[in-house]
Amino acid sequence: MGRKRKVFAVLLIGVGLQVLLGPLFGFFTIAALLLLLIGMMRLRSGAMRQGYILGGIGLGLLLLDHLMIVIGITLISLGWFYVRANKAHRGQPYRLKQGFITNVRYDREPWMMQSSSSWHAIGDIDCDLALAIPDETETVLYFQGILGDLDFSIPEDYGVEIEAYLLVGQIGFESNGYPVAERQQGIQNRLQWRSANYLTSTQKVKLVISYIAGDLNVRLSS
């Protein structure tokens, strides 16, 4: 579809939204929905930066105009976190963490790695498992939130299992610089993977990731 036709299509959709939803919602809500729609279209076309900017502006307008939606989404996410945390750890003991904003930097010096579940509205996570000191033979790291930027570097001698879901965003997964799976970007991104040595490895780690919007990068290294 040419650029002019795309613009015309967006204008038609905008007018249609105004006609249908105008009596029910205000101008800011209509504008927010339109920006979200354009952002999703840009994400699907591969224009990630534009898509994130437009989608972020649309989401911001929508949240400012509907504060209760923000509260509702947060409560639902937190409640779902408690349900899934117990399931992810299969009844084993783990550390529980919650916070509105989380900034984790486990990529600079040795750190103690323990099974944990962490929820946050906004999170920036960097973990290098080559620096980790495991506290158990099988570690489960569960991260959930609204917005997240996550980077994991994992030595290949670990047995690794990954369950990741991002409603909006992108997932990158590579081994020694080569992609293990095709980079996913846009909407409804999932990654389920288990290393060939998982069952036989003496040291295992399982990553469980769930965010509404985020950027996840996992690197395996020899």
Image (cartoon, grey):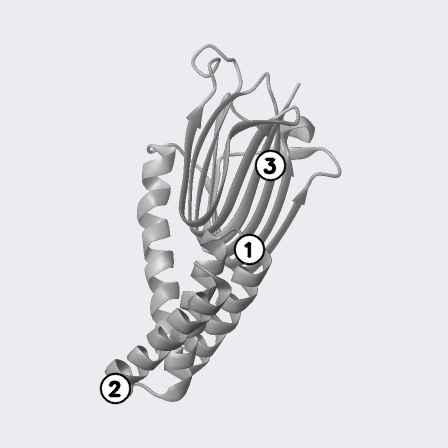
Residue 15 location, x and y as percent?
A: 34, 81
Residue at 47%, 19% in the rendered image: 195
The residue that disc 3 covers is 152
Q: Is residue 63 left or right of residue 19?
A: right
**Residue 154 occupies which quadrant of the picture?**
top right
Q: Residue furthest right?
A: 108
Q: Amino acid at mark 3?
A: Phe
Q: Is residue 158 above or below residue 146?
A: above
Q: Residue at x 53, y 53 (%)?
A: 148
The mark nearer the N terminus, 1 or 2, is 2
Horizontal arrangement in the rendering, residue 140 relative to residue 106 (left or right): left
| Mark 2 touches mark 3? (CB < 8 Å) | no
Give the answer, above or below, for where 196 lies relative to 205. Answer: above
For numbered disc 2, what is the local secondary structure?
Answer: loop
The C terminus: image quadrant: top right
Label 1, on which residue?
47
In front: 125, or 203?
125
- Dot 3 and dot 1 residues touching (CB under 8 Å): no
Q: Position of residue 84 (x, y in %)?
A: 33, 44
State which quarter of the image contains the N terminus. bottom left
What residue occupies the far top of the structure in this picture? 200
Name the kind of residue labelled 2 in the image. Answer: Leu
Give me the C-alpha separation between circle 1 and circle 2.
32 Å
Circle 2 sits on which residue? 24
How many angstroms separate mark 3 from mark 1 (CA)?
Answer: 25 Å
For disc 3, the neighbor class at 10 Å (few under 14, some 14 to 19, many from 20) is some
